[in-house]
Amino acid sequence: MTSTSRKSKAKARKPAPRGRAPEKAKAKPRPKAAKPAPAAAKPTPKVAKPAPAKPPAKAPAARKPAAAPARASAPGVPKPATPAEGAPKPKPKPASKKSRRAPAIRRGPDGEILQPGEILIPGGPHDADEIQYLFRGSVAAEHEAGEAGVSEAMAKRPPEAEADLRRVLGTIGERFERGPIEAMLPQRPAQRKNFLGVVERAKHRRREIGAFLRGLDLGRTETSHMDSHGEASLQSLMEWAARLENLAEADEPDQADYAQFHRGLDQLENTTEALIVDVELTLRRVRDRARAK
């Protein structure tokens, strides 16, 4: 009985391990089921392969900028074309035409056409003082214009006055060429101590300065050829002429010390005469340099 009971127990125990074996067998497929994970990982590199295939598709897109010659031609067209097109239509030409017409447009207060020199000395030189300053300017001009000065002075004078005018021109020419250039203020008559006397004196000095500037104009004097000192003196001389013109056109004040006015005009005449001498000395240096060349 014992043996049979043991056998029955043994038989009962033997199927137990067989039952466990299938559990182990069932556990083995679980790692096999995990294999699909690497299989799923394999498609990822396959997906990555088409990605490098895309750059060759982009390569032709990179070649498209090679069509930039079209862009280069586009900016190139306006730049060279503009000078070529602008050449037949230069802007300086109309400006030069305007400068040529400008002298013909100059008119006086009554609408009359102004002749050359009318702005600087209206009506031409009237007396010996104005003729002297006209000759000083024409002799000192960059291109000596003594003959042109004589012709302008003779415009309203009889023919017999030409000999005297040429004698004065010779004296002034000798002074400029060889002699010392010093102040040559004309002798002034006694002035009336009233407003009219001040106005007449201011007008007369303004015309003397204008006669000198007209002489420089006859000789085509270029201020750019002068040194800075002479150019500044010429500019100051023109500014003083403008002040004298304003004084001559001023209204009479209610109360004024006309003796003080004349003392101021004395100083003004000395100042403007010194400026004229500076311009003459500068132009003599310009002429000496031109002759040395």
Image (cartoon, helix red, strand yellow):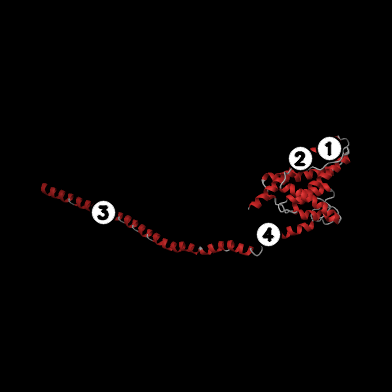
Q: For the residues marked 1 and 4, what is the alpha-carbon distance in whole angstroms?
A: 50 Å
| Residue 80 position within the rendered picture, expressed as x and y whole percent measured from the top left | 58, 62
Question: SS at mark 4?
Answer: helix
Q: Is residue 133 above or below residue 267?
A: below
Using the image as rendered, state which of residue 207 and residue 43 is in the foreground.
207
Q: Is residue 199 above or below residue 95?
A: above
Residue on which disc 2 sits: 271
Residue on which disc 1 sits: 262
Question: SS at mark 3?
Answer: helix
| Residue 3 position within the rendered picture, expressed as x and y whole percent measured from the top left | 10, 48
Q: Which one is closest to the eye, mark 1 or mark 3?
A: 1
- Is residue 281 at least partly visible in the picture? yes
| Residue 199 position within the rendered picture, expressed as x and y whole percent measured from the top left | 86, 42
Whichever of callouts 1 and 3 sits on the residue coming sooner in the sequence is 3
**Mark 1 nearby-residue class (10 Å; few <14, some 14–19, many ≥20):** some
Q: Does the CB distance between marks 1 and 4 fall below 8 Å?
A: no
- Is residue 111 at least partly visible in the picture? no
Using the image as rendered, state which of residue 185 and residue 68 is in the foreground.
185
Q: Amino acid at mark 4?
A: Pro
Q: What residue is drawn where x is 70% and y is 50%?
A: 223
Q: For the residues marked 1 and 3, what is the alpha-carbon distance in whole angstroms?
A: 138 Å
Q: For the residues marked 4 and 2, what is the alpha-carbon distance in whole angstroms?
A: 41 Å
| Residue 26 position within the rendered picture, expressed as x and y whole percent measured from the top left | 26, 54
Whichever of callouts 4 and 2 sits on the residue coming sooner in the sequence is 4
Whichever of callouts 2 and 1 sits on the residue coming sooner in the sequence is 1
Q: What residue is drawn where x is 13% and y is 48%?
A: 6
